[in-house]
Image (cartoon, coloured by chain):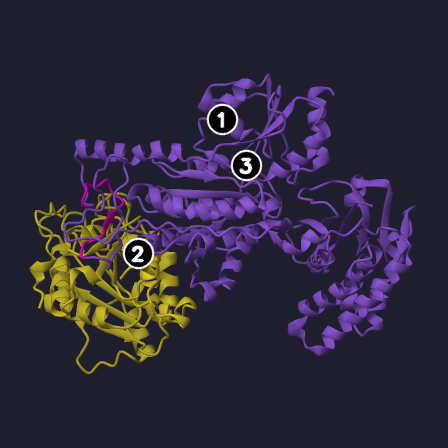
Amino acid sequence: MNEVSVVISGAAGQGIQAVEHLLSNVVKDSDLYVFATKEYMSRVRGGNNSTTLRISCKPVYANIDRIDLLLVLNENAIERHRWRMTTSTIVLGEEKFVKDETNHVVVEFSKIAESFGNRIYANSVATGVLAGIMELNIDALKKNIEQYFVKKGNEVINANVSAALKGYELGRKLGLKLELKKCEEVRKKNLLNGSMAVALGAVAGGCNFVSSYPMSPSTAVFTELAKMSKTHGILVEQAEDEIAAANMVIAAWYAGARGLVTTSGGGFALMCEAISLAGMIETPIVVHLGQRPGPATGLPTRTEQADLNLVLYAGHGEFPRVIYAPGSIEEAYELTAKAFNVADKFQIPVFVLTDQYLLDSYYLVDDLPKMDIERHIVKTDANYRRYTVTEDGISPRGIPGYGEGLVRVDSDEHDEFGHITESSSVRKAMVEKRLRKMNKIIQEALPPKLSGPKDYEVLIVSWGSTYLIVEEALQSFLNHKIAHLHFSQVYPIHPSAKEYFEKAKRVIFIEQNATGQFANLVQQTFLIDTSERILKYDGYAYSVEQIAKAIRERLGV
Amino acid sequence: MFRPEDYDIPNADIAWCPGCGNFGIIRALKMALAQLNLPPSKVVIVSGIGQAAKMPQYVKAHMFNGLHGRSLPAAVAIKMVNPQLVVIAESGDGCTYAEGGNHFIHTIRRNPDITNIVHNNQIYGLTKGQASPTTPRGQTTTLQIDGVYVDPFNPIAVAVALDASFVARTFVGYLDLTVEIFKQAIQHKGYALVDVFQPCVTFNKVNTYEWYKQNTYILPEDYDPTDRDRAFKIATDTKKYALGVIYKNPNKPIFEEQLVAYKVDETPIAYRGLKV
């Protein structure tokens, strides 16, 4: 066996996340690669949620449909996943849930849990059974269970450990032969999800202020930063609304902090006026936007890439901005850190566009690189003018209380001192000054990444979180002249992109939205034909199989 | 020692109408700052949009002239990042109580050490005479042609109900009282609301200088502002409006002092990593 795909399916509130967390860590501590991603309903109890875990002796980074082992925790846990099952899928669960399945294995999780004193230990039993089936490291199982319940006291810890060990023993006896070859290089790696990567990236970029309003799927970034607030000196405030949050973050930058706001499309809708303010007063703001399907409340817990236009056009008036769309957990870290430096340097809004899929997906990454914190604050003198007109459009930025100067920012059109003006010549000079920053911003844009043969004929284009899914899908087209071009900066687009497009006989865009927003932007930017598009907008993440199939159909191969 | 003119902006092109109550407020504010001997480089005036919000344009200090309704979130954040600054949020009744109503409520809950001066002329001036949240019922305006038919917002009662740590009202026609209240508000540790009655001589022909003199009274010297029940009674009495410090709660924890980031290190976040 090289890889096992395990899906755990049950109702909200049954502890699927606990099993996901425990099993991912036990897998890692057993010297195996793991990729985990979850899909869940917008409810606290009931319904059906699931987690997919790919466990492998080779690196795994992307979502797949195939299920080898389906662990069910309640009566409605199978039907939603039927389309993903094959003739060899094994269904594991209590008799009443699995008895009608041809390929089933009965494990009475609740009864076993009760024998240790409480039904609630069923998650530990389940984790143990799965660990046993795959012959994972038993000490790692014990250690992770102990750590997970550390705050619950010895009685609960011991009961959970005993329940898990019982499950392990049962799992081994099932004889399913799903043992995997171990690989020690995993030991040097860390298990991380997108949310943690964005939060760690923010800290690495010197973030010391975060104000937001909770909204799925962006909230975990907020809570992760709150957890780090003591050790890293971060001011954290849960604002009364997104309007306050964004205005607070801008004012925090004005006062000398490096601020982040984390939100989703619906929350960001309320921040548009603040983005325009940042544009006018040339005060930085970093916005992390975790996308989910809209319009309006849409599908609160699902995934989509449909807020590119929202951040691209947010804010009345004309001013520069930068939009990153990380393609991996590593990029989520690096680009969030970079966002702080770029926002500071150019005094503009910078967006990090992620989505539920990336934020909620875990895999193993190498140690994250140390990022440089570039601060661009000047000590002011008595003659300081906040909006000095300069050749590159960047005026030295001072902060109140650092130097003798007064820092006066104004949301009205203003002169160099920051005072209201209605002079047409000053207005023209200020508009041009602000937009002039774009020259350097474009020069410093991240070029797209090309993978696959250099002599490609077909160019598959992706942006943001679909990167690794497309990469894996293209493994089945190695004999074709198909390359993959990925954009992790979607605005402004690096000029080098044009050559890649021109070289291709066919360009196919893959996006998780209904209108091909990035393809439209590329068309508008380079005046090329971008009409070939593979689009998905059902709220569920792309899988390797779905992308491979879509490409196959397009190319007729 | 600073003088009021030390806060002047040379050649300021002041956009207020002759006779506007804002002239009295700016005069009182500069006098208060001078009497408290606050250097301009220590003071940040944060405002929203409207005629009142132009105040920091004409006062020599740091300025954050942001968006309509958003002066309070900005002021709170500035105080969080640099507690050493004296932060004054200043805007009109529309900006603070309508567009910024939610921020008004939650800023009071936080109790940051900032001063909130609200120019209350009971009308929208810059947009030419529509009703504001504090325009009395029945008053006709350029928009409410048959008269306002909703109850006015009572900022003092709301602030007392939310247990704001300092709630005061003054009338710009009484300069000494206004200067005194501004000084107390700035010196008060915690959120301080000063609602300032100020005539709009162009668009509000009802609430004139004379009207305010007739319809207000100054709280007596022996008035105890820490009695919340009494303060609430005074706040809800709209037959005649009380002027003075109506309510004070000196025991409320200060917002920025509770921030986790300052528990281990008192250096303002603003200065960390800078060569100070």
The residue lying toward the viewer, choosing from A390 and A59, is A59
| Residue A297 vertical placement versus B1 (above, below) | above
Q: Quadrant of residue B229?
A: bottom left
The colour chain B appears in is yellow
Residues under numbered marks 3 and 2 in contact, where contact means CB atoms less than 8 Å apart: no
First of labels 3, 2 by sequence position: 2
| Residue span colored magenta | A404-417
Q: Which mark is residue A497?
A: 1
Q: Circle 2 sits on which residue?
A: A255
Which type of secondary structure does the marked residue at label 2 adopt? helix
Q: Which mark is residue A306?
A: 3
| Residue A447 vertical placement versus A215 (above, below) | above
Q: Quadrant of residue B259?
A: bottom left
Q: Is residue A547 visible?
A: no
Give me the C-alpha separation between circle 1 and circle 3: 22 Å
First of labels 1, 3 by sequence position: 3
The colour chain A appears in is purple
Magenta stretch: helix, strand or loop mostly: loop
User: Where residue A502 appears, x then y in whole percent?
Assistant: 52, 18
In this rendering, would A167 be left or right of A496? right
Q: Quadrant of residue B153?
A: bottom left
Q: Is residue A406 magenta?
A: yes
